[in-house]
């Protein structure tokens, strides 16, 4: 990989329009609109392709006419204003907060053409940093006076968070807006905005820290300063990487939204590093110190501004993407090479516009340019089609009048019919691109939505979301039936949509922020896997596991996931619980489903771990460790790139791609036979392989499909006699509804079992189920609807308390004992009669 630098050259068309002094303020107002604010009293607008769109007429700077008028009236003439920091509002695309060298906080709208509020005494001395929260609910300012202040979005002071003796050179928010990270001379501090909390402070550098950045996706921190080093930290202040001493101090740092890379700026130097600090590309330039860096949301290029008034763009070229036997190289902005290493066949593709994004999976290469999608597969011709219209972007129109009023310089960015060129294509628009076998999904920040398209160009659906610019490859996943995405408005939720209709299928809720998402491509049970900010790997079903293995092609059930715990018997307050997700393991760094089987690969605690049937956590947690395969070789801080066939590709902390072959022998064949319900073939395969892991996978698959006979054989091979006995008793039941309900109980899906029993008119068995699990409150709630069953619950409770030699203290049962007369012997006999009717022995 290398950086291709571009910057506008001075010409007759741009004469007087470029910056002539240092540019301390730079930022993206929208996915394709860059604004720069310089000490030469100019506000300029740029396209994502690096084209100058023209200056903006703004009241931020006093004009010469205003100065003359002030002098004529006897007032002090207006002086030049210098702005030191700029932050665009994440939700309102035309609102910006500015900090000045005089300590003023200015809120502007309409892309800087209208001043809404000026706080004249926000700080004593210059405001060095201004930052919005991710949800645009508050503004942080830090200055030379050592104060960090918290402001409302309307500019009202809420609180003073920090008061220290040294200037605040850099500060930023955590992803959830609950904490701030700031510099304190040679130390870094993480502090909660809640009063009374203890800050976490650690010495980070040997010199003054000038910059710090905190990624909202990974939680990683990068710092740099006058000791000429940059360092990577986790959210607890533990050092992950320390660079060698560079030639010059670090003057700017910025993360890409995805958290995969970050950029470092210093004097006449720019470099891009992976998330753990290793340099991917570096470039030298004649620009002086790099003051500001701003990534495009798609993470393929960034803008920079410098002390010499230069605003430029750095594009990452010579990027390589690999998948099985296909290698894709972006040789230049408009040239892509695709090679099949198995056959030696190679194609070089030339495009009219810059290639902004490339992805390859399922034998198909997808490439995005300014306004088109190009799909290539060996043996087929290149297929190209237009992206959706970008008329909704509206940024150019919003500032057109301001640009035109700026005089002759305002027309410099347009060209002949090209004034709206930035509104075209995905240079920065497309923040995520994920593929499935039949189609692919793109997150379009300009249209605020996710589009699902077939490889032939037909739009399957469009899903409208807020803050699509926060979506990236790590928190978007798609298969042939569903799209799963982290909720941009609540990072603890996962939204699931039907790709055929675009309608919501489920909202899966978790208690912690979700860091990454993937969704299964194969199998009868489609799962969503997440890694949360604590590093836990969890899975949840897209739809209810239900009444035995409904195919993924069945009509999706529109639902919001009820917070039930799948790994234990639910308590009486099930509705107050918080998640359908069930934990597979901890210390996870990356996870990816196989493209052709339900196997889930993960990097956990420095090891590559394969979950050969991840639904085990939802079906029989006792088999969880038996279906896990751990590779012995350490893979420190690795990311899984893809998992297809029997090969899994990882990128380790050193930037090296590793391919692990023959990951799970026989597992693909076993899953295929189970999906076709060829259970005899599955048993034969397991007996041939003589593998405990395969027997465990077969047990999970058979239980998921309610195949009792095969499940008995598998559990017997695993020497789990108790489960064999229980399954045998289920098999003896005469009613299909009862067998299904008992299998749901076996899978710990108690609410589903209750619903099935009540629906088939077996209220007695539903109450009996809760009684046997000692879930007394739920048993009473259900029996209250069927008054003749109350004596059964009271009798069972009395027998339980007597066996435990305890006195009754439960208020509900104490009240029932006083108001209800029960003949315990008669009730026990009635229970035995009812059990005999349905073929259940009292011993069960």
Image (cartoon, rainbow, N blue to C red):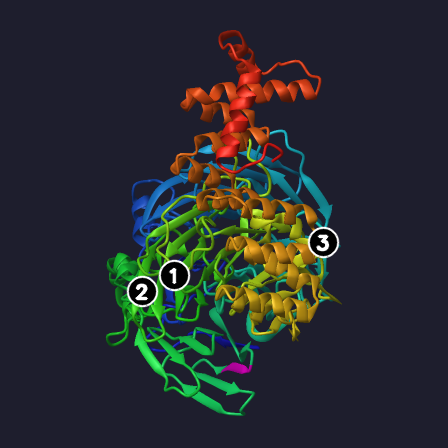
Magenta stretch holds residue 326: yes
Of the residues under marks 3 and 2, which one precedes in the sequence? 2
> Circle 2 sits on which residue?
460
Whether residue 361 is situated above or below residue 199 in the rendered picture = below
Of the residues under marks 1 and 3, which one precedes in the sequence? 1
Residue 719 is marked as 3
- On the image, which quarter does residue 288 sit in? bottom right
Q: Position of residue 346 (x, y in %)?
A: 49, 90
- Residue in front for this viewpoint, 714 or 807: 714
Badge 2 local density, few (<14 within 10 Å), some, or many (20+)? some
Q: Position of residue 333 (x, y in %)?
A: 45, 80
Q: Quadrant of the C terminus?
A: top right
**Image depth: mark 3 or mark 2 in front:** 3
What's the magenta region? 325-330
Q: At x 25% / y 60%, what residue is drawn? A: 397
Distance between mark 3 and mark 2 Cα atoms: 48 Å
* Residue 614 appearing in the image: no
Distance between mark 1 and mark 3 Cα atoms: 35 Å
Q: Position of residue 442 (x, y in %)?
A: 40, 65
Describe the element under mark 2 as helix, strand or loop.
strand
Describe the element under mark 1 as helix, strand or loop.
loop
Of the residues under marks 2 and 1, which one precedes in the sequence? 2
């Amino acid at each position: 990989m290398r950086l291709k630098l571009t910057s506008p050259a001075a010409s007759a068309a741009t004469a007087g329009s470029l910056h002539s002094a240092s540019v301390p303020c730079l930022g993206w107002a929208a996915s394709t609109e860059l604004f720069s604010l310089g000490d030469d009293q100019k506000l300029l607008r740029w396209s994502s392709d690096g084209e100058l769109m023209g200056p903006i007429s703004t009241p931020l700077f006093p004009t010469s006419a205003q100065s003359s008028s002030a002098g004529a009236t006897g007032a002090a003439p207006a002086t030049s204003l210098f702005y030191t920091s700029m932050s665009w509002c994440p939700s309102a695309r035309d609102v910006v907060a500015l900090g000045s060298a005089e300590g003023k906080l200015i809120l502007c709208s309409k892309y800087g053409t209208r001043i809404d509020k000026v706080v004249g005494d926000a700080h004593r001395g210059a405001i060095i940093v201004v930052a919005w929260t991710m949800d645009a609910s508050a503004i942080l300012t830090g200055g030379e006076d050592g104060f960090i202040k918290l402001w409302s979005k309307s500019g009202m002071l809420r609180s003073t968070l920090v008061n220290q003796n040294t200037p605040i050179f850099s500060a930023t928010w955590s992803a959830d807006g609950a904490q701030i990270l700031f510099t304190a001379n040679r130390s870094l501090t993480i502090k909660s905005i809640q009063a009374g909390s203890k800050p976490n402070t650690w010495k980070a550098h040997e010199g003054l820290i000038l910059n710090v950045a905190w990624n909202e996706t990974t939680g990683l921190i990068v710092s740099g300063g006058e000791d000429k080093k940059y360092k990577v930290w986790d959210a607890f202040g533990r050092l992950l990487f320390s660079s060698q001493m560079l030639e010059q101090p670090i003057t700017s740092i910025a993360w890409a939204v995805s958290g995969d890379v970050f950029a470092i700026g210093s004097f006449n130097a720019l470099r891009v590093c992976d998330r753990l600090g290793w340099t991917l590309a570096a470039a030298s330039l004649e620009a002086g110190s790099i003051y500001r860096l701003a990534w495009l949301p798609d993470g393929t290029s960034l803008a920079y501004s410098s002390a010499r008034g230069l605003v430029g763009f750095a594009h990452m070229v010579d990027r390589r993407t690999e998948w099985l036997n296909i290698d894709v190289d972006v040789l230049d902005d408009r040239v892509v090479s695709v090679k099949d290493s198995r056959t030696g066949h190679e194609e070089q593709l030339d495009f009219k516009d810059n290639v902004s994004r490339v992805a390859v999976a399922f034998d198909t290469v997808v490439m995005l340019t300014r306004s088109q999608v190009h799909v290539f597969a060996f043996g087929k011709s290149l297929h190209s089609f237009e992206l959706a219209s970008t008329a909704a972007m509206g940024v150019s129109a919003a500032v057109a009048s301001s640009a035109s009023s700026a005089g002759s310089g305002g027309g410099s960015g347009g060209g002949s019919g090209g004034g709206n060129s930035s509104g075209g294509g995905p240079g920065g628009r497309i923040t995520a691109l994920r593929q499935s076998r039949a189609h692919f999904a793109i997150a379009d920040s300009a249209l605020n939505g996710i589009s699902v398209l077939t490889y032939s160009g037909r739009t399957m659906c469009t899903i409208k979301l807020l803050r699509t610019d926060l979506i990236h490859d790590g928190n978007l996943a798609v298969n042939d039936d569903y799209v799963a995405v982290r909720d941009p408005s609540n990072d603890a939720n996962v939204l699931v949509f039907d790709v055929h209709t675009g309608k919501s299928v489920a909202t899966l809720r978790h208690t912690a922020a979700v860091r990454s998402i993937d969704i299964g491509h194969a199998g009868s049970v489609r799962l969503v896997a997440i890694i949360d900010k604590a590093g836990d790997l969890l899975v949840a079903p897209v739809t209810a596991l239900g009444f035995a293995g409904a195919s993924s092609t069945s009509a999706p059930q529109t639902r919001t996931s009820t917070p039930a715990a799948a790994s234990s018997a639910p308590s009486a307050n099930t509705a107050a619980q918080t998640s359908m997700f069930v934990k597979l393991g901890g210390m996870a760094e990356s996870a990816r489903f196989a493209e052709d089987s339900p196997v889930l690969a993960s990097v956990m605690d420095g090891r590559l771990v394969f979950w050969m049937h991840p639904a085990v956590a939802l079906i029989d947690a006792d088999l969880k460790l038996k279906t896990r395969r751990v590779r012995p070789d350490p893979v420190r801080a690795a990311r899984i790139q893809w998992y297809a066939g029997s090969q899994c590709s990882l990128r380790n902390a050193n930037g090296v791609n590793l391919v692990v072959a023959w990951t799970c022998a026989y597992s693909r064949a076993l899953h295929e036979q189970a999906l076709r319900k060829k259970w005899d073939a599955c048993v034969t395969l397991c007996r041939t392989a003589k593998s405990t892991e395969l027997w465990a996978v077969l047990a999970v698959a058979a239980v998921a499909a309610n195949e009792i006979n095969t499940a008995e054989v598998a559990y017997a091979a695993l020497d789990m006699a108790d489960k064999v006995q229980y399954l045998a008793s289920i098999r003896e039941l005469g009613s299909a509804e009862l067998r299904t309900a008992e299998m749901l109980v076996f899978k710990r899906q108690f609410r589903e079992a209750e619903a099935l029993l009540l629906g088939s008119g077996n209220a007695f068995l539903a109450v009996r189920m809760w009684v046997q699990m000692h879930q007394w409150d739920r048993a009473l709630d259900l029996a209250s609807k069927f008054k003749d069953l109350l004596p059964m619950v009271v009798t069972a409770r009395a027998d339980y308390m007597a066996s435990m030699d305890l006195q009754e203290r439960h208020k509900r049962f104490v009240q029932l004992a006083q108001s209800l007369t029960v003949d315990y012997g008669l009730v026990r006999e009635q229970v035995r009669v009812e059990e005999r009717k349905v073929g259940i022995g009292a011993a069960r």
